[in-house]
Image: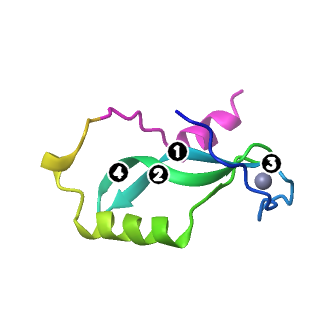
Amino acid sequence: MKPEREPAELCADCGKPALRHARVRSAFWHEDRLVVVEDIPALVCDSCHGQFYDDDTVTILDLIRGDGFPAEKARAELRVPVFSFSDKLSFRRGS
Ligand SMILES: [Zn+2]
């Protein structure tokens, strides 16, 4: 992978000059399914780990979402562990 030009902007979240270009993956809820999109071009902050997409990327993500994430177009399938917030609440008193 060839290095891309480093951006000069400051992070919109933490204000530090720690942004770099990267390809990221992100999870989206689509109706009752959780789907993952890989290879999204983003600016990533090495300080606070914020991820920022430019307008073109947001538009393309909207188009992908509009396709409805058909299963036959998926590159791969992930098994995802599921946890409950309320499990932690019930353990809190006993620990
Ligand atoms: Zn930041």
| Mark 1 vs 3, N-terminal side | 3
Asked if residue 73 lies left or right of residue 12, the reply is left
Label 1 with label 4: CB-CB less than 8 Å: no
Q: Residue at x 63, y 33 (%)?
A: 91
Q: Position of residue 48 (x, y in %)?
A: 77, 48
| Kind of residue at badge 2 | Ile
Residues marked 4 and 2 touching at CB (< 8 Å): no
The image position of residue 41, as x and y in percent, is 51, 52
Amino acid beneath label 4: Leu
Question: Element under label 1?
Answer: strand
Mark positioned earlier in the residue sequence (4 or 3):
3
> Which residue is tagged 2?
40
* Snapshot quadrant of residue 53: bottom right
Task: Assign a secondary structure to mark 2.
Answer: strand
Q: Secondary structure at mark 3?
A: loop
**Residue 23's disc number:** 1
Between the residue at mark 4 and the residue at mark 3, the CA separation in whole angstroms equals 30 Å
Characterize the local packing of mark 1: few (<14), some (14-19) or many (20 or more) Cα atoms within 10 angstroms.
few
Q: Residues within 10 Å of mark 2 (few under 14, many from 20)?
A: some
